[in-house]
Amino acid sequence: MQDKSAVIAIYALTGLVIALWPLWITEKGVVAASGFQFLKSIRSTTALGLAALGVILITGESIASPLILGFGLIALATSMSGGKLDVVAMSTSFLALCVSATLPWWLRQNGSLDISNYKLFAFSLVTFVFIRLFTAHEPIRKSKLPITWIIVYTLFAAILCFSTGIYIDNNAFLTLWHHWGAYVGPAELLLTGATIFHDFPVQYGLGPTTLIASFCGNDCWEGMYFIVSFVTLAFYVLISVMALALSRPRWPERLAVASLCFATCFFWTGDASSVSSPLTYPSVSGLRFLPAVLLTTFLFFANRIEYSKLKILIAHSFWVFSTLWSPESTFYATFVWWPYYLFIRRVQGDFGSRAKGFANATLCLLSISIGLVIIFNIIFRIIYNEGPTLYGFLAYAINPPGAMPINLSGGVWYFLLATVIGMGTLLYSWQKGGDTISFRRGFLVQLLSYAVFSYFLGRSHDNNLLNIMPFLLLVLLNAISATDSKNLSRASIVLTATFLGWLPLFGWQAWTVNIMEGRVLTFDSKLLRDSMSFSSDAERAIDFLHQGYGEPVTVLDSTLDLVDSTPPVAWSAIHGPANFAFIPSQRRQEFLYRTATSLKRSGWLVVDQKFLADEWLTDFDFAYERTNRLKFGSYYAIRFTPKRHD
C-alpha cells in the first residue's frame, strides 16, 4: 500500500468533499449553483470531443481502428431522432463508449482491444438495442415499486445462486475451493477453540467467520454452500430493489434495468474472462458487501428519517452490525451513514449555528463508536480472558493480498466518469428541488459507490473494478432518472448499455457446457465435497496420516487449498494456508506461536517438493519441533509438535 500513498491521499480528500459538501449549502445554495454553471460550461461538442480523444490515447487505440469507428457508428445511430442529428448527444455517446473500452481488460493486447469483427458487431447490436430501450417513447405510468419485476428477478437470481452444475467444470470448482477455503479455514480454527484476532487473523472479518462457524456443524463446506447462496441472493435482490426503484415507470426501461442488474451482479462481479457462478467468488458479493447494502437500502426507503427516533435507532443498529462484520464493512457503512446522518441533522443559519450543529451530530456518532469499542472489548475478554491485538484485527488491511499498481489506462477511468456523472446529477437535483427524496437517494448511492471503490484500491487488478459494477450501476441509473441534463442522462444510458454490450465477449466456455448438458437446474451441495481431491501423492499422504496417526493435516502446494475434514480439526494458525500467503514471516511466526500455546496440538504438514516452502518451514520451526518425516512420492510430510516453554 505504500506505493499508493498519493492515490490514497487523493481518494481520502475527494471522499471528504463528496461526503460533506451538502452540509454547508443553503436551500438552493451557492455551492450547487456554481457546480451547475460549471457543468453547463462543458457542454460543448469541442470539450466532449477532446475528452474522447484523450481517452482513446490513454487506452492505446488507433483513431481509425474498427473499434473506434464502430463506436462512432453507434453514437451516430443512437443520436438520430425524427431525421435530425443531435450533435451534442452523439459526442457524449462517443465519449462514453470510448471510456467503456477500458473495462474488458482480458481482451487487451499490447494496449489495444483484440476484438474480431463478429464480436464488435455483437457488441454494437446489443448496446444499440439497450440504448433504445432507455430512450423509447413509452408513456410514464404512476410511479410505484415494481413488485412483479422484483419477484421475477428474485426467482431467476435464486436459480443461479443455488445452482451447482457449473462446478463440473474443473477450473470453476478449483477456483471455488481456493476462495471458500479462505473462509472455512478461520471458521474451523474458531470452532477448535483458538482466539480470533489474537491467535489467528481473519481475512474477511468477524461476521463471516462466526456466521460460518455457527451454522456449519460438522461440515463447514456444506454449511458454506447454503450461507453463501442465501447471503449472495439477499445482496443481489437488494441491489435490484434499489435499481428498479430508481428506474422510471416505463416497461422498456424496467426491462433494461432488470437485465442490467442480472448482468452486473451475476457476470461482471466474477472473472469476466472465464465466467462462473457468483458463488465461486463469495468475497465480491454478500459476504463482503451485504451489511453496507442493508444499511443503504434501509436509508434509501426511510423517508423523513430525521423525524423518527426509531428509524434513527435502526440505522445506528445497522451501522453497528456492519462495524462488527469486518474492518472493510466498517469503512463502507461509516462512509454511508455518518455523512448521511450529518446531513439530516444539519442546522440552517449562520456559520456558527451550522458548526455547532455539526459538532453535536459528530459527538453523537463518536460516542456510539467509543461505546461500541468498549463493549466489544469487554465481551471479548469475558469470552477469551484476553483482548484482541491491533495487528490481528487489521492484518489484511495492512497487508492486502496481491497488491498491484493501478493501471492508468484501465477501468479506473470508467469509475471516474461515473463519479463525475453522479456528482453532477446531485448538483442538478439540488439546484432543481433542494432536499428531495430523489436527492437523498442519489446521495446515498454515490456514497456507497465511492466507499466500495476502496476494495479496488486494495489490490488494484482491473478485474477488481468489475467486481463493484453493481454499485456504479446504481449511480448511473440515478443519473438517468433524476436529472434533466441531456448530457448526464445520455452518458449514463450509454455507459449502462455497455454492461450488456460487452457480455458477448466474455469467456462463456463453462456456461456453454453447463447449458448444453442441462445442469443449470442441478442443486447438489454434496457435489462440491465429492470433488475435493489433491494430487494422487498428496491424497495418499493425507489418507495414510489420518488412518495411521489420527492427526490433522495441512497441505502446502501451489493451490494453497484447505484439507477437507469432518468434523473439522485444526492444529495451527496456518490451518488455511491461503490466508497467510501475504502475511510477513515474522507475523506468521507470532500467530503460529500463539496457536501452538493455545491449542497444544500436534499435526502434519504435507509439502509439495516443488513448492518453495523454506520460509514457511522456518515459521513452523519457531513454534514447533519436528518429530517425524515421511516421503510420499512428490510430497513429503513433517510432523510438528508444540515446543515446551517453561
Image (spheres, rainbow, N blue to C red):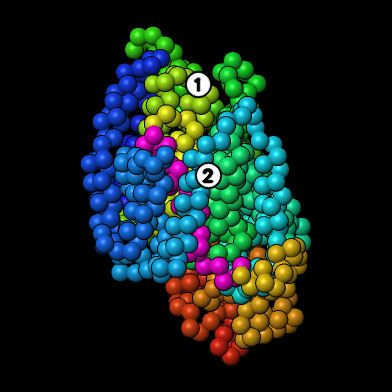
Q: Nearer the viewer, residue 82 or 246?
A: 82
Q: Residue furthest front?
A: 83
Residue segment shown in magenta: 486-511
Give residue 333's position: percent from left, percent from top.
52, 37
Asked if residue 487 is among those painted magenta in the image, a careful observer would answer: yes
Asked if residue 253 is among those painted magenta in the image, a careful observer would answer: no
Give residue 90's position: percent from left, percent from top.
34, 44
Residue under the image location 67 percent in, 57 percent down: 160
Q: Does residue 386 appear left or right of residue 547 in this picture?
A: left
Q: How many residues crowd around disc 2 within 10 Å: few (fewer than 14), some, or many (20 or more)?
A: many
Q: Secondary structure at mark 2?
A: helix
Q: Which residue is mark 2?
A: 133
Residue 16, picture quadrant = top left
Please name which of the two marks, 1 or 2, marks the residue nearer to the observer: 2
Hey, what amino acid is under mark 1? Thr
Give residue 584's position: percent from left, percent from top.
43, 62
Please tell me whether residue 332 is drawn above or below residue 41 in the rendered image.
Answer: below
Give residue 27's position: percent from left, percent from top.
40, 14
Who comes first in sequence, dot 1 or dot 2?
2
Q: Secondary structure at mark 1?
A: loop
Any part of residue 228 in sight: yes
Magenta-colored segment: predominant secondary structure? helix
Any part of residue 642 in sight: no
Number of labels in the image equals: 2
Q: Which residue is mark 1?
A: 436
Marks 1 and 2 close (CB-CB < 8 Å): no
Residue under the image location 45 percent in, 68 percent down: 118
Q: How many residues crowd around disc 1 within 10 Å: few (fewer than 14), some, or many (20 or more)?
A: some
Q: Does residue 87 appear left or right of residue 343 in this picture?
A: left
Quarter of the image with the C terminus in it: bottom right
Real-space CA distance between mark 1 and mark 2, rounded to the nearest whole angstrom:
27 Å
